[in-house]
Image (cartoon, rainbow, N blue to C red):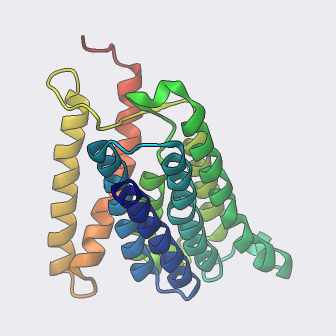
Amino acid sequence: MKKHIPNIITCCNLICGCIATYCAFHHAHQVAFLFILMGAIFDFFDGMTARALGVSGKLGVELDSLADCVTFGVAPSAMLFTLFNHVAYPHVMASNFFFYVMPFTAFLMAAFSAMRLAKFNIDERQHTEFIGMPTPANAIFWGALISSSEAWLTSPRFNALFLFLFMILFCWLLVCEVPMFAFKSMSWPKDKMKIIFLAIAVIFLAWGAISGGTDPYGTVWQGLCRGAAASVGLYVVMSIVASYLPKED
């Protein structure tokens, strides 16, 4: 029985991704993001449980990738799809062609997420660090951003072209050759950039919770989402900076 426990946890991740996708298509973005976060928690514990029980195997690896593709690829793409249906369109794109076609470009992110997961499975370099942005970080960024800032994203100050270019940037980050943090080791001073990042991320989350709670038009949850989105952005920037710094022995 114990050999099935990690796979059951992985399937919980998959189910969370399916529910998140359903919620996203029904414009319940905050609920969708909550299920993405729940999927990320299950994703964290399935591998840990498999190693603790000594039951790691190829089936678990493949199942994990399939579940991640849904939760961290399809679900955030569905959130982007509905956002494209409500975002402002500039005058040069004010035609039925763009109104109908642009929302479907959101699924480029699902495709790039699948490529990212496939590369991870065959890339022997990614035992100690990630090469390219991990799919959970990408999904958390988009889920947090849309959950906290949808009013701004759909305002005239933003538009579909900006959203498309922003999405393409993150699609590239998923498959690029830039090393990014993996939190498999945490020792000072070798991993000081990771530790500094975590400290700042905690500050961002605390700032978000406080600002959201004191904003008469916001909530603590929205504030935490803003802090989470800012933390993922910081993760990308600090990972890129760290890749150019000399390695500590």
Q: Quadrant of the C terminus?
A: top left
Question: Who is closer to the viewer here, 210 or 107?
Answer: 107
Q: Is residue 29 above or below residue 7?
A: below
The mark tally for this picture is: 0
Picture coordinates of residue 83, whole percent (x, y): 58, 77
* Whether residue 36 is situated above or below residue 238 in the rendered picture: below
For the N terminus, the quadrant is bottom left
Residue 13 placed where, x, y %? 43, 66
Residue at 20% over, 32% down? 186
Rendered position, 199 above or below 94: above
In the drawing, does residue 148 fall left or right of residue 82? left
Find residue 20 and report its horizontal and vertical position in percent: 48, 76
Q: Residue furthest top?
A: 249
* Whether residue 229 can be seen here: no
Front residue of 215/16: it is 16
- Residue 14 visible in the picture: yes
Q: Residue at x 38, y 45 (%)?
A: 55
State left or right for residue 8 relative to residue 157. left
Q: Residue at x 66, y 66 (%)?
A: 106
Relative to residue 143, is residue 219 drawn left or right? left
Q: Quadrant of residue 78?
A: bottom right
